[in-house]
Structures are given as structure tokens and as C-alpha cells.
Amino acid sequence: MSAITLIARGAGRLRARAPKIEAVLQQRTLKSISRAVGVGLHSGQRVELTLRPAPPDTGIVFRRVDLPEPVEIPMEAQFVTDTRLASTISRGGAKVQTVEHIMSACAGLGLDNLYIDITADEVPILDGSASSFVFLLQSAGIVQQKAPRRFIRVTRMVEVREGEGANEKWARLEPYHGFKLAFEIDFSHKVVNSTGQRVEFDMGSGSYSRDIARARTFGFTKEVEYMRSKGLALGGGLDNAIVMDDTKVLNTDGLRYDDEFVKHKILDAIGDLYIIGKPLLAAYTAFRSGHALNNKLLRELLTQRDAYEIVTFENEAQAPRGFAEVARAW
């Protein structure tokens, strides 16, 4: 078949018209540079963050630019080396702690390629959610690139479990044309019990920034006091976390969502799972999961080569609902 279609016009006149070509779902990066300054949640150290555009197929790469020899750490499950209080990545002796909130924002906005220059070993906590990172990314603008967007499509169920009875927790990935998450928490606390402890969210809804990104990290006064005695949570406070005593929320502005606690766990899971390096096409379901189990799930998936495939979409109409839209600049 010819690449040009001839269409009759008027009395014997011919005009060549190219056939309609469906748009390939393309990779995305930033249009310009964006910067932020804050403190690390656990270290309390001042840290500068610079978000830069990156070429196609770069992925999301952290760069420790404060070191004598800058070290690049790409977002890959194998580089996660600590998950006790947050997701920490490291390479060649350099590390970056608490990457999950900014990774969640990148996933929520559909960013594929990005350099994140950082001047300390921990991402700034900012307001304790992903909303500040969403603002920084959208302020820089998001542009499409001339390369097809690659997805990891789960083809069969993969599951990891730990503990038994009251200590049981698990997480699984199942085939799904899109990316949706269902998360359930189980806290024996008066305030948490009075809120929703299970949430389902579909990334194709386009409402990540509104419905998930503003959910803050949370903790209890006893835990905060203990962590500070161990030199942790030095940058935490009521301006960047929900803090509770035995009976109530201590933040004067209360909760941002009626179910903010479990929504923050969804936010974390989105960020933890995006560390795999490409957007997932899967249904994620979890009960009492956390950073460690989320990373264990990624590693389990990657070891089972028949459980996933790398796919692209030659036209946007074939992509899952909501995945073709580019987030607007603020």
C-alpha cells in the first residue's frame, strides 16, 4: 500500500494527503529546571534539590553532587539497600534516603526521565507528602520526547508474604490493563481506627495530585521521642508530619483527608514500586505492607522472568485509560 493516498478534488484535480498516523505513547521529561531547599526527615540536615531534564531512556537518576566525585544512582530495585524507615538507595558508597515521596510524584505525573541533583544523603521532607514535589515538577513543565514509553506489564500473579496471625503482612501484583492499588492498614489506635483503613486507587483516574499526593507521613509521639533518642527523625515536626499522642492528632489543622493514613501508605507504595525503573501495568494489593515488603515484591517479580514483559503502545488509543494525557504545567 502506498504511503500517500490520492483524493479527488473538483474537476479532475488531485491532491496528495498523507494517511492519519496514530501517535506513539511517548516518554516524558521536564521542560526546564526546578529547585527546592529543605531538611531531611531523619538527618535534619539542610539539603538542596535540583530537578533537571534528562534524555530519552535515561530513567530517573539521583546524583550526589556534594561528593568529591559525583555519584549517579539510577532507580532500579537492586540499588535499594535499606528499608527500615524509608526507601534508601546506594551505590559505590554513596546513598540517598527517603526517595519514595519524590518517586511517587514522578509516577503520579508520568515522568520517565529525570536527573535529581542532591547535596546531602536524604531527600528533603518538605511538607511530608508528595504535593510539594508535584508542584516543583509541574512548575518546570512536562514535555514529551521522541521515544516510545516502555512499561513493565505483569502477566501473572506474584506475591510475597511475611509473618503469621496478628503479624501477617503481604503484597501482590496481578495482571491489569493500567495501574491500580488497593491497600489496607491495621493500627490499634483510637484516631486511626476512626478513619478509613482501606483505600483503592486507579492511576488512570488522573486524580493523583488531588486524591493521593497531599497525604502526609505520620507517627506517634512515643515513636518520635524514641527515634530522636537514636539520632533519627531530627527534621520531623508538626509542619511535615501527622503526629498523634494516645488519643488525638496534635496538628492544629487536623487531617487533609478523612483516610489520610492509608492514603499515605498508597503514596509510599506508588513511590516504592516506581523504583523498578519503568511504570507498571498491574494491580497491586497489599495488607500492612511497607517499604521492605514492597521492594521484596519488586525483586520477586524480576526473578520470575515469565511473570512480566516490556511493552510499548504504538498508538495512544491502545494505552490504558488516562495514561496518554500529559500533566499540565502550573
Image (cartoon, rainbow, N blue to C red):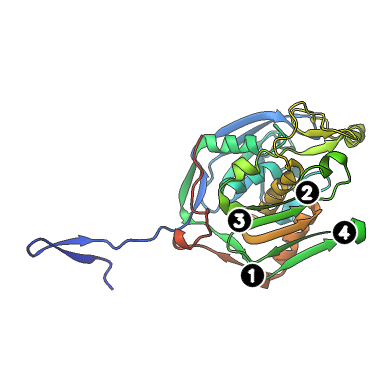
Query: Which SS class for mark 2?
Result: loop
Task: Give the residue at mark 3.
Answer: 279
Task: Tell which circle, 1 or 3, labels the residue nearer the N-terminal end.
Answer: 1
| In the foreground, 211 or 278 | 211
* Mark 2, residue position: 197
The picture places residue 209, in percent across and down from the top left corner, at 60, 41
Question: Which residue is the site of mark 4?
Answer: 168
Identity, as a three-letter code, of the amino acid under mark 2: Gln
Circle 3: element type: loop
Say whether residue 70 is left or right of residue 198: left
Residue wearing tag 1:
155
Q: Secondary structure at mark 1?
A: loop
Tell me, yes or no, if residue 76 can be seen here.
no
Task: Pick whichever, 289 or 147, lies toward us.
Answer: 289
Determine whether the residue tagged by mark 4 lies in a helix, strand or loop: loop
Q: Position of residue 172 (x, y in %)?
A: 74, 62
- Tell me the residue at 62%/57% (across/down): 179
| Outermost residue to the front | 194
* Distance between mark 1 and mark 3 Cα atoms: 14 Å
